[in-house]
Amino acid sequence: MNKLVLIAFTVSILQVLNAQETEIGNKLFLGGSLHFLVQKKTYPLSSLSINSGFGAIYSNSTEDTKNTTFAISPNLGKEINPKLFVGLQLDYRIGRYKAEDISLFGQPNSIDFERNSNQVGIEIFTRHILNPNNKFGFFLQPFMAYNLLSGEETQDSKVTREEIANYFEVGAGLGMLYNFNSKIRATLRAGGLNYINGKWKIKDTDQTKILAPSERI
């Protein structure tokens, strides 16, 4: 099967985005979030935004492992009125996992293993402020996004698997904001109801898989 369409609804309460926004004049605001994580001496974890389905990985030791994730999401928006904002957000994410001397299911010898992933996305959103006159407020944020993902796995420096995925996503999240002053505010956004329609393919094969809504960086 060369093509696969996913339709999924999910309520995500664990996906939380912290951000800071600054007004830049003419009722425009500029904001975003930054995430960076480095873990050493950890058991293998998938760094892909999509579940690779590679199979079980067993580490002989956690001494020579490293897991790195990085994400940046700048956004630009405009105030239509005190209760309504519209905006555009870009999303860039990478994941890197390296491990030396690990055992893979079905293979007799230990190997050096790497898994790398990249994701680029663009999102259009509106933000509906529920109590615009308060210093501490709440908002509802519907959005529509498109994402491109790619990933590869290597064993002893040889590429053994390449994956690509693309999907559309529409949904709505909830959030809180705190206005420090007329120019700066902090926001906290939690995931909500999502609808995803996409395709995930392993390169040079006819294999496709369902992209689960929770399997994102």
Image: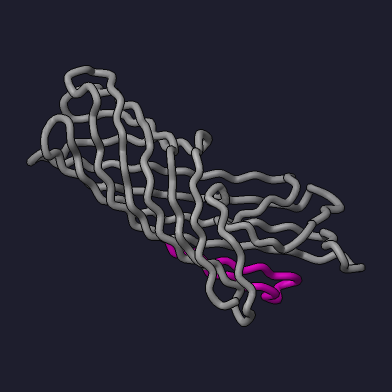
Across and down, in percent, residue 122 comes to 34, 57
Across and down, in percent, residue 136 comes to 28, 19
Single out the residue that lies furthest toward the left: 26
| Residue at (23, 29) in percent of width and height | 129
Q: Is residue 90 above or below residue 172?
A: below
Q: 203 and 181: which one is in front?
A: 203
Q: Is 48 situated left or right of 172 in this image? A: right
Question: Residue 206's image quarter?
Answer: bottom right
Across and down, in percent, residue 17 comes to 42, 37
Question: Residue 120's image quarter?
Answer: bottom left
Across and down, in percent, residue 147 comes to 42, 60
Q: 94 and 135: which one is in front?
A: 135
Counting labels gives: 0
Tell me the quarter of the image containing the N terminus.
bottom right
Question: Residue 2's image quarter?
Answer: bottom right
Q: 151 and 14: which one is in front?
A: 14
| Residue at (24, 25) in percent of width and height | 130
Q: Is the magenta stretch mostly helix, strand or loop?
A: strand
Q: Is 54 situated left or right of 104 in this image? A: left
Q: Start and end of the magenta stretch? A: 147-164
Residue 157 counted in the magenta span? yes
Q: 89 and 199: which one is in front?
A: 199
